[in-house]
Amino acid sequence: MKAKIFAIANQKGGVGKTTTTVNVAHGLARRGKKVLIVDFDPQGQCATVLGMNPEPGVFNLLIAPTGNPHQWVRETGRENLHVLPGDRTTATAQIVLNAESRDISAVATVMAPFAQEYDYIFFDTAPSAGGLQERAIWASRFVIIPTATEFLSSDGLGQIIGLLEDLKSKKGWSGGLMGVLPTFYDTQTKQSKVAMRSLQEAFAEYCLPPIRRSTILRECPSGGVTVWEKDPDCVVAGDYQKLVDLVAKR
Ligand SMILES: Nc1ncnc2c1ncn2[C@@H]1O[C@H](COP(=O)(O)OP(=O)(O)OP(=O)(O)O)[C@@H](O)[C@H]1O
Ligand SMILES: [Mg+2]
């Protein structure tokens, strides 16, 4: 298997999962790596933040696998960057997977042809726990857990860390945590600094360098652009550049 597969996960909503997925994926694509984004969130935002329309790609691949699996992959208009989009039907796919008690390896199996072709695959996941998230993590070699430093959100972190431990000890998962990624970091607020420090204490070398709160990043989705297209020289582009460097070393 060629591709390094990453899952971006946290049951907590609005912590920067999709933002991280898309900007790290595009950052690597700009370095000449062949990258596929897979959207496992029924909100279908990977497509929209890239200026595209959500589509039932994930549903078709998982539930109605006829013909060439590559037919569901879309060009993004960016060199080396492709997306397997999702939409509301992804929620149905999750229900079917659970109802049929599909194996924990179900996502790994359908991704196998893509893993031969791409250098990196990034799974964006929904802000909820569930069978699809579990199977996506199981198919991944590394997991990045974005967590907002605006408030102390460590309760949600316990849940996802517990899931990773269960997948390892009970389901034979061979991947692991790459790190917890502090997001919405704001050096001006005490809250943010306290949250950052507690993450560093709890996760040590598994606490990644933070992504700062940035108006530019907030504005990217409405323009359907990544930070590299909006302003590659801005402060938060520098933050994501560091993360791209770390991912590229894996
Ligand atoms: N560092 C940041 N600074 C400012 N705004 C940000 C930052 N990161 C993300 N955002 C904005 O916050 C919102 C939520 O981010 P995003 O969609 O990436 O979170 P998410 O975890 O994927 O959410 P969901 O759980 O709903 O899928 C978006 O409008 C995004 O543009
Ligand atoms: Mg999201």
Image (cartoon, helix red, strand yellow):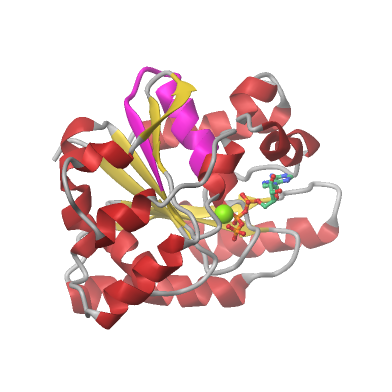
Within the image, what quadrant is residue 230 found in?
A: top right
Q: In the image, residue 138 lies at what x, y percent?
A: 27, 63
Identify the residue at horizontal 32%, vertical 60% (top origin).
136
Identify the residue at horizontal 41%, vertical 24% (top origin).
29
With 97 as the anchor, is 209 left or right in this view?
right
Identify the residue at horizontal 65%, vertical 50% (top origin).
183
Reply above or below: 80 against 105: above
Identify the residue at horizontal 46%, vertical 74% (top origin).
129
Reply above or below: 191 against 159: above
In the image, residue 125 lies in the stretch drawn in magenta? no
Q: Nearer the viewer, residue 87 or 166?
A: 87
Specify the quadrant that holds the N terminus: top left
Start-end of magenta stretch: 21-38
Q: Nearer the viewer, residue 241 or 7?
A: 7
Q: In the image, residue 213 lies at what x, y percent?
A: 75, 44
Q: In the image, residue 15 lies at what x, y percent?
A: 63, 57
With 39 as the anchor, is 119 left or right in this view?
left
Q: Nearer the viewer, residue 185 or 29?
A: 29
Specify the quadrant that holds the C terminus: top left
Q: Residue 139: in sight, yes or no?
A: no
Q: In the image, residue 33 lies at what x, y percent?
A: 34, 23
